Amino acid sequence: MKKHNFSAGPSILPTSVLQKASEAVVDFNQSGLSLIEISHRSAPFVDVMESARSLSLELLGLENKGYQALFLQGGASMQFIMTAYNLLENKAGFLNTGTWSNNTIKESKNFGKVVEMASSKEANFSYIPKGYEIPQDLDYVHVTSNNTIFGTQLHDFPSVSPLVCDMSSDIFSRTLDFSKFDLIYAGAQKNMGPAGTTLVIVKEDILGKVSRSIPSIMDYRTHISKGSMFNTPPVFPVYVSLLTMQWLKDLGGIKAIEIENQRKADLIYSTIDQLDAFNGYAAKEDRSFMNATFTLAEGAKGDQFNDMLKSAGINGLNGHRSVGGYRASMYNALPYESVVVLAEVMNEFNRKGM
Ligand SMILES: *Cc1c(COP(=O)(O)O)cnc(C)c1O
């Protein structure tokens, strides 16, 4: 039986997507060939890549607005480097809201001056800093929209340009004016597909402004000019990402999934707040709709709670080691019913006063 999968990443994908993907591995569209044994330059795969690139822009409302979509390798972590390689000439500004932003800052220092505009490190990243000043002379500003580990999320974004955003764990989950961003990147394995590819959406006019020479594979312009086929792309992750995006489009797109995601978040947070046995981790106004972090009021009862989770078929609820406690990741593909099951377990645990 399918488990209730709250894994933080790699994470749940729609069952229909897994089914189609597994069929394509054996026989892709009745071609007599597997998706993963054909040339990436063959017409059927070029069609997959082009569909994935255009559908990602369509879902975000960014078609015909000067953006290009790329499916690259190296994970979101490679984008910590590529963003700075391509954009950082003198100085860039960073909002330090968690482990991933912290890593971006660290890597960007290899390329230029880094201004940490604000940080919530002193409170173990349990909130999003606000009211900070943004220097005038920055090449760009980098933010992380959703802090997967700590369970906080930016509900407002700085009005600056160029704005670069790591959306690895909340891409396609909520409506935003995506045209406010000049570069968006997202590792596929949280809300889109298997590990192995990273979606990069870049506004072309921000490129080509740094004086350094950039190795071909690190240069966004190379990938744009080659239609995201500079070298062999990760064919299977790109295909599964396409299937997930098609699933989302059929559901009604980001607008429709946002309503579901809001329902799931409302249920988990109201459960945490109502029950004495649990404490929310993140500041209420900064809570993430994707990753809800919480702890037990009495940590010593962890074994009992874990047993109850296991019997209910709940997977992946353990918090990240830097926060402890629990984390319910409620990505697009997680059904509302799974959150209902988790809330029931939490209520029962509370009732029994275990
Ligand atoms: C998971 C995650 C990353 C790291 O992604 P990799 O693909 O493993 O490099 C970066 N940023 C955020 C927000 C994440 O959730």
Image: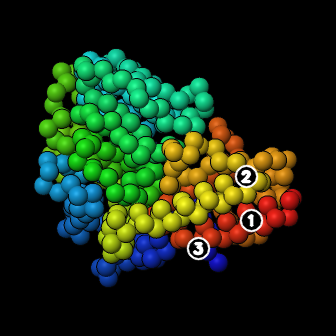
Q: Is residue 319 above or below residue 104?
A: below
Badge 1 crowding class, 10 Å Cα cut-off, few under 14, some 14 to 19, many 20 or more, is some
User: Between residues 290 and 77, which one lies in front from this camera angle?
Assistant: 290
Q: Is residue 239 visible?
A: no
Q: CA distance from mark 3 to mark 2?
A: 21 Å
Q: Secondary structure at mark 3?
A: helix
Which circle, 3 or 1, is nearer the viewer?
1
User: Between residues 177 and 233, which one lies in front from this camera angle?
Assistant: 177
Q: Is residue 200 above or below residue 261?
A: above
Which circle, 3 or 2, is nearer the viewer?
2
The quarter of the picture where the C terminus appears is bottom right
**For the residue marked with disc 3, what is the amino acid?**
Glu
**For the residue marked with disc 1, what is the amino acid?**
Asn
Question: Which residue does the image show at 59% across and 25% down from the upper left?
Answer: 122
Q: Residue 168 location, x and y as percent? A: 42, 48
Q: Residue 345 location, x and y as percent? A: 73, 66
Q: Secondary structure at mark 1?
A: helix
Q: Mark 3 vs mark 1: which is more N-terminal?
A: 3
What residue would you read off at disc 1? 347
What residue would you read off at disc 2? 278
Q: Is residue 87 visible?
A: yes
| Residue 258 horizontal side relative to residue 277, left or right | left
User: Between residues 285 and 181, which one lies in front from this camera angle?
Assistant: 285
Q: Residue 127 location, x and y as percent? A: 54, 37
Question: Which residue does the image show at 38% across and 36% down from the upper left?
Answer: 143
